[in-house]
Image (tube, grey):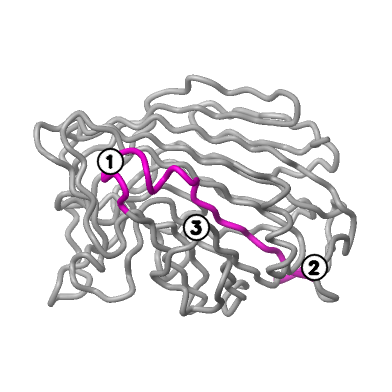
Amino acid sequence: MSSPLRITHAHGDRITVTEEHGGIDLMSYVYRPEAAWEAPKPYIHPMRTLTDNVVTDYRPNDHRWHKGLQMTASHLSGQNLWGGNTYVHGQDYVPLPERVGSMAHIGFDEITTDAGRAVVAERLSWRHNDGTHWADELRRIELHDVEHTGAGAGPGTGASSGTSGKGTGGSWTLTWSSAITNRRTEPLLFGSPTTHGREAAGYTGLFWRGPRAFRGGRILGPDGEGPALMGAQAPWLAYSGEHDGADGHATLIFQHAPENDHTGAGGTHPAHWFVRDEPFAAVAPSFAFHEELELAPGDTLARRYRVTVADGRWDRERITEYLAEHPW
């Protein structure tokens, strides 16, 4: 049975979900607006393991607009809802503040906890730099399957897995759902630096930035491993990194829902993984890596993802076993 969860809402700022068994704040969903240059949008940071180790980064000095886990849109019909400089083919990254838009918090429809599950349901407005309303988003974030295993428990965690911290170790999962409806009178074009001419930079959509200590971590997929998985397709991708300050590792497993390639705008528009272990740790199940995705006026782009946060350096066998035990 999953552990009980508690929600604390600091109105106008953030929602924090705490696992009551060990008193660990597993995540904070921050929705206060931040610097315009960073494309203001809600994000999750910090995210923590059940042993109280942080597995996200916030405003690193190389990319101030990288904030934990967030929904992004690096190229959207000429606007940049990602933050910072905009990639322009032949000019590299260029400061174009007039292109930097935002995803504004409008309101919450649900903030609840029940039977080991916490839910945050939110309405957002995607906006052009000049404030023009371009899209509505219905977002639902669920935290669930909080499972304690004890230090070093479970096959494939490895001798150096380590679970130093306040808790006992284990894993928990977050499901992120977004439904984005085009409110313009013309199509919205979702793209990436790769669709605009830069190789191996197909980031857009849900994006995770790992802590600095996770540089050089291990990348695993169902049938491959390492940076070669950049731009590949697979139902899941995992990233393991070693903590600073505390002994041991953590593993994050990213999944895109089976229906992501079959429903919503673009029909069978494929998802491809953006992943880096150098010069920083990052993962994104990009919905516009190699080709632009067109969203017609009034149409809705619906996507659903899961992120499992686990103590230890899980191998492919352990990951496969876990996913089989926790189907969509």
Q: Secondary structure at mark 2?
A: loop
Asked whether disc 2 touches disc 1, contact meaning CB atoms under 8 Å apart, the reply is no
Q: Say the numbered circle drawn on residue 157.
A: 2
Mark nearer the N terminus (3 vs 2): 2
Q: Quadrant of the N terminus?
A: top right
Contact between marks 3 and 1 (CB within 8 A): the answer is no
| CA–CA distance in space, label 3 to label 2 | 22 Å
| Callout 3 crowding tier (Cα within 10 Å): few <14, some 14–19, many ≥20 | many
- Residue 66 found in image quarter: bottom left
Q: Is residue 141 above or below residue 306?
A: above
SS class, disc 3:
strand
Q: Nearer the viewer, residue 209 or 180?
A: 180
SS category of the residue bearing label 1: loop
Residue at screen point 65% across, 71% down: 241
Q: What residue did someone put label 1 on?
A: 265
Three-letter amino acid code of the residue under disc 2: Thr
Q: Nearer the N terminus, badge 3 or badge 1?
A: 3
Where is residue 287 drawn, in percent x and y?
34, 54
Which quadrant would residue 188 be assigned to in this image?
top left
Q: Is residue 209 left or right of residue 16?
A: left
- Viewer-nearest of labels 2 and 1? 1
Residue range in magenta is: 244-269
Q: Is residue 101 magenta?
A: no
Amino acid type at circle 3 is: Trp
Mark 3 highlights which residue? 208
Residue kind at label 1, given as amino acid type: Ala
Question: For mark 1, does the 10 Å Cα neighbourhood hold few (<14), some (14 to 19), or many (20 or more) residues?
Answer: many
In the rendered image, which quarter is residue 309 located in? Answer: bottom right
